[in-house]
Amino acid sequence: MRLTIRISIAAVTVLFAAQLFGAAFAPGNRIVREFPIDPAGSIWIENPFGTVEVIGGEGKLVSVTADRVITAPDAASMKDAADSVGIDFKGDTKALLMWTVFPPAHNARWNVAVNYVVRVPRGVSVKVDSKLAEHIRVSHLSGGVTINGFAGTVILDDVAGASSISMVNGRIVYDYAQRPVSKAVVQAVNADIDIYLPPNSSFDWIANTINGDILTTFPVRGGRFSGTIFHGTVGSGGPTIDTTTMMGRILVQAKGTKLSQAQSVRVNQASHQPVPGDVLLQPPVKIQLPFVNGDFNSAASVADVTISEVRGNAHIVFGAGRVELGAVYGQCNVTSMGGPLNLGDIIGALFAHTGAGDIYVRVARMGGQVTTDGGTIRVIVAGGPMTLRSGGGDIIVRQASAAIDAETTSGDVTLTADPKQKTLKATARTLQGNIILNVSPHFAADIDATILTSDPDVNEMHIDFNGISVRREQVGNKTRIHATGKINGGGERVELYAEEGDIHISAHTITPIKVASPKR
Amino acid sequence: MPDCDAMRENMPLLLTESLDPVQRELTHQHIETCPACTRDWSSYKETWRMLDSLPELEVPARVKQRFLAGIAPELAETNVVPFHRGRAVRWLAQAAAIVIVGGSAFYAGHRVAPRVQLNPTEARVSGVQQLVPAAAYSIAESRVLPAASISPQIEGRPDIQNVQFTDATPSNDQIGVSFDITSHVTVTGHPTDKSMVSLLRYVLENEDRESPSRSRAIDWVRSTYSRVDKPAPEIIDALANVLRNDQHQGVRIKAADTLQSLRSAMTDSTRDALVEALKNDPNPAVRIKAVEALAKLARSGAPLDPGMVDMLRQKASQGDENVYVRVKAAEALSSIQPR
């Protein structure tokens, strides 16, 4: 018995000495603890749900107050939540880790948030991990700060040490009490970033956003853009403040100035050499209009545009976005670095390009050029000659009334000739896929069709016309199947080339697609 | 071919095992190498088998008289007291019948279309219908069927190729005919029928087939199952596999598009496929559709695993990624509520 008591006492003593002990909230919802810490030690706080406040001060103690807030519909759920969520502490005077312990999976009927207030010696380093917090505030610290969270407002107030903040949603506010002396990296996806500094600050500034603006009340020297990334110097330069947010706004404001005085650095300098990516420096737009009486011109970094009718020319340049135009009476020129294009009745010449995404064109009366770096191209009626290019994806033309030149890196090409056309010039190439050419039985052309395949038993040439001679030859480890000849006496040249696919020239009765006259 | 004529003459004797060993071996060797004789030999054996299965009936006197008059006129004139046939006589009759049937078939085969038509007796046909229960039609790569389960009626002109004849156990009377057959099958049923789901899954995942058929299958699946509240998980998984594995970029784009459009609870496999496509697919259109599908999932409030959230976060911040993909990833992240 005596031995047992001795061992127990020894164990408790060791635990206390090593600062290793967990804590449960029961019977109350508050935990208060104190731990000794070195003035240059570090503290890690992992709290998935709930606010975290870390306040620097004097002394050699870490003081933790944690309040647990349970939301549950009934007593049983409340008890389940209370029994399931606790706090654990680990570490020593060099490093102290505290984290909220959640069960791996819990009843969705209850939610628990734990709100921490942690008072620490000013010089310690602090690291906070969070998922959802109303706010995470770190203040009066000279040590380093690292915050990694998903959603919530992060406030750094009087933090002099190096800092690294990474959030997804919410807002980041960085309030410098003194001139910056350490590097700061502030990154977000959807959050706005506001940084307030003394007016006499000197630092190197990097800012990067796609959807938002970059504003400052400081005079910035040597501002330049590299893509969407802005580099500039404030004062005589100094530590780097790196601010990046994908969809949010970046504000760097001198204390004592007003927000209304802030200017966008996106206004290009006179010395700036224009590059295609400059469109990303334009402000984003969201346009939804029934019609535009005249020409429509728009350039934006990120945009979503839906216009039923443009009664003039349309000229659109977007960094990214979805474009939907019902009808364009004049020329239509749409360039997007990414996003699907949906174009209706284009009466003038068409030029459409997207860096990524599908392109749908209902009617291209005068034809034109349609290209995507990756995506499906679908043209219902090609009234004029068209050039179609896809970096990968199918190309489909439901009715071609004029010459077609279609090429895809990987995908099928399906062309249907207007049955009213006796002959039609067509070029189709796919580096991986099939080509299907649908024509009426009286269609006339000079056919030159080639298949290059590593499996000639699978890939075949199907031509529903007589008068075509087919040759096979070995080219390296592949077989080339080459069909040439005139159908129905010959006509325009039809050149088809497919790798690792079939070629079908299919003759059948085709019902022409009727195109209504535009209402002017 | 002169050999063939001689061999055909040997066939009845081969059937009755009356051929000497040397001739028997030669005849077998020839049959194995000559497709025409192979066909004839099959006909002989089938006829022989059928004859053997016929009930023993008393031959009417006038038929017997005519038969004997045909083969041996002197016998017909002899006044012989009739008696029941012994076994040897029966074999002789069978051999004679073989000669007649085989000879007639051979003769007809040279003058009319080369089509062998067997006319089974009524008794046999009704026996097949009664004894063999209607089994589920299974679509299989290879099947072994007892002859009794095959309808004697061959419908249309099925394309039968790669015919081989087997006799795994020569000691018994069972033989085998194996062949590839191409026939057009139409399966009808509700989109949620298990068989229909399995069949569609097979079509979707059968990458050996040319892409137009798979493209059409995906289009069809999309239009059909977008009307169904909960498409079968097998269909969703099949589309996920296409998205993950298909070499053809046009097909992958369609698969991603269809996954996005279907109203269904996403399986883990589908999520993994979408995350993998977003991460690795070289085609930006596939990545766009993958990120849009994940964004849709996020908007629906479905729980997202940390790997998926990390991937969206990585894509939103990835400088060399297409801007539209980044924007969509950011939009997806904005609608996620951590749990």
Image (cartoon, coloured by chain):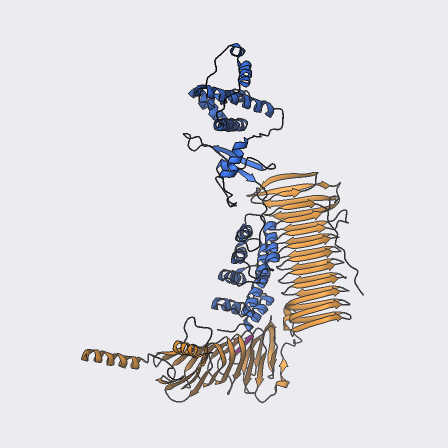
Chain colours: A orange, B blue
Residue A273 visible: no
Question: Could you tell me residue A503's position as x and y percent?
Answer: 64, 46
Residue A414 visible: yes
Question: Could you tell me residue B206's position as x and y percent?
Answer: 54, 50
Residue A58 is covered by the magenta coloring: no
Q: How many marks?
A: 0
What secondary structure prevails in the magenta region? strand
B98 or A144, which lies in front?
B98
B138 or B238, which lies in front?
B138
A197 up-or-down from A490: above or below: below
Question: Could you tell me residue A257's position as x and y percent?
Answer: 60, 88
A36 up-or-down from A496: above or below: below
Q: Is residue B191 left or right of residue A313?
A: left
Question: Could you tell me residue A508's position as x and y percent?
Answer: 71, 45
- Residue at the left extreme? A2
B108 or A514, which lies in front?
B108
B326 up-or-down from A376: above or below: below
B74 or A511, which lies in front?
B74
Identify the residue at image location x=24%, y=79%: A8
B92 up-or-down from A127: above or below: above
Where does the magenta region start and end? A241-246
Tell me which corner region of the image, top left, top right, bottom left or bottom right, holds residue B235. bottom right
Tell me which corner region of the image, top left, top right, bottom left or bottom right, holds residue A20. bottom left
State which quarter of the image contains the N terminus of chain B: top right
